[in-house]
Image (cartoon, rainbow, N blue to C red):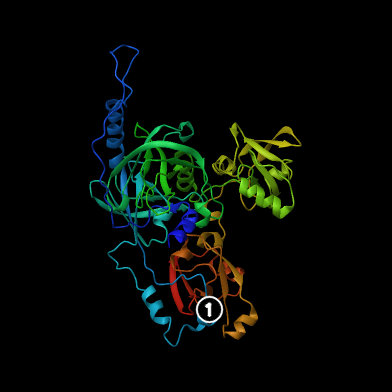
Amino acid sequence: MKSTLKKLLPFAVVGVISGATTVGTLQYFNHDSNSADQSYFTKSASDVTFAGMNSSAVGDDFVKAAKTTVPAVVTIKNYQSRTANRASEQDLFDFFFGDPFGGRGQQRQRQQQQVPDNMPSGMGSGVIISPDGYIISNNHVVAGANKLEVVLSNKKSYIATLVGTDPNTDISLLKIEEKGLPYLNFANSDNIEVGQWVLAVGNPLGLNSTVTAGIISAKGRGIGILSSQGKAANPIESFIQTDAAINPGNSGGALVNTNGDLIGINSAIQSTTGYYQGYGFAVPSNLARKIIEDIKKFGIVQRGFLGVQSLDLSNDMQVAAYNKEKKTNIKAGSGVYVTGFGDNSGAEDAGIKVGDVITKIDNTAITDFADLSIAIGSKRPGDKVSVTYVRNGKENMTIVTLKDQKGGTSTRTKADLSVTEKIGAEFKPLDERFKTDYGLNSGVIATNVTEGSEIAKIGIVDNYIVIEVNGKPVNSQKDVEKILDKYSGNVSVKFVDAYGQIYTRGFKMP
């Protein structure tokens, strides 16, 4: 048993999402209180100080920051109905006909029991960022909610409106109807330094208004959590790493400096147990601020793309794997190696080629993919960036115009989105032989379902089959788009889940 545990421990998940679910069991540890200051003392002099920490000065700073921050940090309760089982593995027979003999039926019935209406499915934190009730949090804190309750530090409660979300950065924006609220100012996260004192404020493990202190341990961390667990299509990860204690429930809470200014939104922990082990991660305030400004102004996030496929030269394992697969001999080091281009690539238009190594964007050094991710991810379509790259040992520079994923260079609003973008899914035709074999007259397969989208909220995930939209059969994505193009009002969707059960659910067309 011990040898098995030793083998398993190194493979513990990196970056467990910290916040939507509150765990109700706490463990208390006893510590030896008989510790002594072993500092040496000398006569008082103007250029001599005690070797111990100046607890008075630091304490004053912490008290000031805590008093500023606590009233502006809220609890967010996520209420949702779980009526559709979301098993990813399917037995093809059960997919359409269920389990008539009851073997798995009883288990399925237990899995589909709804959470009581008066009990939240999860809890996290949020930060008030304006006196009129705008609140920033994580996308994973609000995902799947059909009701969001916000509780202030003074216990006053509100039902919040979800203004918008961005799974690619794990940021969400909520609004409550109130005035004169305490709020936090954004600080410039580009100016933070490793070793700087910070405070994390949130509601871990159901303990409201908890303040912990630590330092910034590192900057620009990419831990792969948004793509592996957050379902982000184009994740931006350049986290602030801190050793201020963060636990489940802290997600969406504030990471502040000693002035009480917001430098990050706490999002994740790195742990073998799911609880604090010394590593917490926060979305930098500059990136978070850009996301919420886009949501408020345009209704959607404006994302510019360089248009390159790349290899992180700082990742030895990635480089070794690439060399093995491609039979190349690329050396690990610093920078991002260009391996290819996407459609409508601004970088390719600007003369960048496969094999170039990107080393700088504007005045920011690019040492790894996390650097490139935030340098470009914080820009909008149409923005121009200076790209410094190395080709055949020589440094070059070019100007790249960033584009959106459709090749556009202008900002868009919700009104400019396609039907599939608005509802958050794409659809593939169902094979005719498949329809015949299983007695279906219509159907499309849902793909690329966006977390938190209208389609996701009604229980549809990738590979579920949509039979009808607004009472009309659908056999292609064009059918869905034709039915919902310029449509406003309630949408009815008939679909089949992974166990062959047919549901009809609805949402209001965004």
**Residue toward you, 44 or 448:** 44
Q: Give the residue displayed 43% in from the left and 72% down from the top.
A: 84
Q: Where is residue 49 drawn, in percent x and y?
A: 32, 18
In this rendering, position of residue 407 left or right of residue 249 = right
Q: Amino acid at mark 1?
A: Asp
Is 304 situated above or below 477?
Answer: above
User: In which quadrant is the N terminus drawn?
Assistant: bottom left
Is 59 situated above or below 506?
Answer: above
Can residue 185 be seen here? The reply is no
Badge 1 is on which residue?
A: 91
Can residue 71 be seen here? The reply is yes
Q: Give the residue displayed 30% in from the left and 67% down from the top.
A: 117
Q: Secondary structure at mark 1?
A: loop
Q: Where is residue 399 drawn, in percent x and y?
A: 68, 36
Q: Quadrant of residue 428?
A: bottom right
**Residue toward you, 489 or 301:** 301
In this rendering, position of residue 342 left or right of residue 38 = right
In this rendering, position of residue 399 left or right of residue 301 = right
Callout 1: 10 Å neighbours few (<14), some, many (20+)?
Answer: few
**Residue toward you, 191 or 318:** 318
Q: Where is residue 54 drawn, in percent x and y?
A: 30, 25
Q: Quadrant of residue 448?
A: bottom right
Q: Which residue, as the protein is rendered here, is positioned at the far right? A: 392
Q: Where is residue 232 drawn, in percent x and y?
A: 52, 55
How many numbered tags mark residues here? 1
